Amino acid sequence: MGNVVRLDRRQPRRPGAAAPGRAAPAVTPLWREALGRQLRGEREFRGERIADVAGRAGLSPQYLSELERGKKDPSSEMLEALAGALDLAVVDLTRRTSTQLMAVAPAQRGSGQVLLAA
């Protein structure tokens, strides 16, 4: 669940390799990465430790750390628990995360097919 490989039909190249004479393309952040940044930002804004928020949400500090680093995708139940622990509604947390993703320049958002490697 780690790598995202974009399928580009124009010209076969190694994933991540730049075209000759061009800089490497920017990669659109994944939802879990944007959510992790948002969770960490909300926690730090409140001046709380990972252990504080994790305890209120009913999960381990290690798991919250993995979420904040964008390594794990939380279930809807976990998202609800985390939002509640941060005194937010799920819709507010997801809206803030979506706003982060929308801030990425349209040319960087990518379009077309994406292959998720297991």
Image: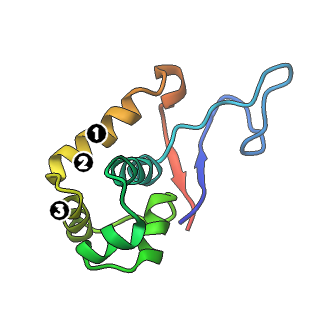
Q: Estimate how packed mark 3 is, as few (under 14), some (14 to 19) or many (20 or more) residues with alpha carbons within 10 Å.
A: some
Q: For mark 1, what is the residue?
A: 96
Mark 2 is on which residue type?
Leu
User: What residue is rendered at 40% in x and 51% in y?
Assistant: 44
In which quadrant of the rendered view does residue 92 lie? top left
- Helix, strand or loop at label 1? It is helix
Protein image colouring = rainbow
Q: CA distance from mark 3 to mark 1?
A: 15 Å
Q: Is residue 64 left or right of residue 25?
A: left
- Helix, strand or loop at label 2? It is helix
Q: For mark 3, what is the residue?
A: 84
Callouts 2 and 3 close, C-beta under 8 Å: no
Q: Is residue 11 left or right of residue 73?
A: right
User: What residue is rendered at 35% in x and 55% in y?
Assistant: 43
The disc at residue 93 is 2
Mark 2 or mark 3: name the one nearer the start of the chain: 3
Name the quadrant of the C terminus.
Answer: bottom right
The vertical placement of 59 against 83, above or below, is: below
Q: Position of residue 4 (x, y in %)?
A: 57, 52
Q: Position of residue 15 (x, y in %)?
A: 72, 45
Mark 3 is on which residue type?
Gly
Q: Nearer the viewer, residue 75 or 12?
A: 75
